Amino acid sequence: MKITIFNGSPRAERGNTHFMVTEFAKGAQEAGAEVENIFLAGKEIKPCNACYACWMETPGECTTQDDMEGLFQKVISSDVLGFATPLYVDNVSGLMKNFMDRLIPLADPHFARDENGESRHPRKYDKPNQIIVISSCGFPEQSHFQVLRVLFRRMARNFSAKLAAEIYRGGGGILQSHDPSFQPYLESYKQLLQTAGKEVVLNSNLSEDTMAQLEKPLIPMPNFVDEYRKRANKMFDERLAKLDR
Ligand SMILES: Cc1cc2nc3c(=O)[nH]c(=O)nc-3n(C[C@H](O)[C@H](O)[C@H](O)COP(=O)(O)O)c2cc1C
């Protein structure tokens, strides 16, 4: 199984999202998958210019010349397409949205009727037939991912692919914390992400238990959200107090 994960964080390998991708990929590799991680931040990906050449003139191929040419080949040779993104303004990052728009050559222009009677473009390529999502955000609650939960359900539907895993993490600021009291919980979370990677490879989905664990607060302390806000505000105050203006 080939899994290609596209990461839409401008912070790339320094990012909280990459922390999650790394552990997921470890688990997936242990279960036998080949995993490739691609940072969109290092690529030239122009916005879709809506010329429709990929549908009407060079079917299946985008005529815009930039790095998307090589990336498109990576997408259609993967069994599992991974979207890894920080949450930006309740949505995917701009880098990720550009990439998603540029996937339109994956679809055939014709309007088909899906199993619910809704219109959909038929798929043009055999692969990828599974999608996974990995995302982190700054606020501590899981509720901030509500737009992404709908968006990626729709993405999977649009591409006639299975949504094999959704991995969302509020409180992303903790993931790379060096606070010794957090380390045991971060270790458990890493293990959980590795389990998720294994499950996608072995079962093409996440178990109910893994899904439930992934939604739990990162640090199982009472008033976790209040404490997280307090720490964040203290950090902002300290940083702002140092400014000479
Ligand atoms: C432009 C911008 C918009 C953001 N919007 C949100 C948001 O709507 N909700 C949220 O909880 N965090 C938001 N964040 C914080 C990031 O989602 C969070 O820091 C994330 O863990 C960053 O991941 P990364 O390190 O992989 O880039 C935003 C950050 C930026 C720079």
Image: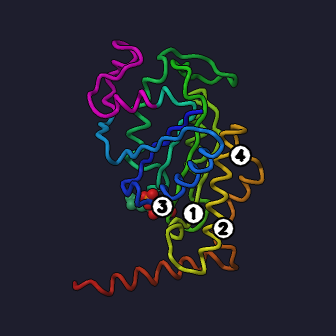
Q: x%, y% of residue 185?
A: 64, 71
Q: How far separated are the C-alphas under marks 1 and 4?
A: 19 Å
- Indicate whether residue 53 is drawn in magenta: yes
Does mark 4 have its CB less than 8 Å from ligand 1?
no
Circle 2 SS class: loop
Q: Amino acid at mark 4?
A: Leu
Do the residues under discs 1 and 2 have CB atoms within 8 angstroms? yes
Give the mark, 3 or 2, whose residue is nearer the N terminus. Answer: 3
What residue span does the magenta drawing correspond to? 48-74
Circle 3 SS class: helix
Circle 1 SS class: loop
Give the mark, 2 or 4, whose residue is nearer the N terminus. Answer: 4
Q: Is residue 163 above or below residue 168?
A: above
Give the mark, 1 or 4, whose residue is nearer the N terminus. Answer: 1
Q: Amino acid at mark 1?
A: Gly
Left of 238 or right of it: where is 63?
left
Identify the residue shown where x is 27% and y is 32%.
66
Tell which of 95 and 145 is nearer to you: 95
Does mark 1 have its CB less than 8 Å from ligand 1?
yes
Q: Amino acid at mark 2?
A: Pro
Reading the image, the residue beneath label 1 is: 170
Reading the image, the residue beneath label 2 is: 217
Q: How far separated are the C-alphas under marks 2 and 4?
A: 18 Å
Q: How far separated are the C-alphas under marks 3 and 1?
A: 11 Å
Identify the residue shown where x is 53% and y is 79%.
179
Q: x%, y% of residue 228?
A: 56, 77
Reading the image, the residue beneath label 4 is: 206
Q: In terms of image quadrants, where is residue 141?
A: bottom right
Do the residues under discs 3 and 1 have CB atoms within 8 angstroms? no
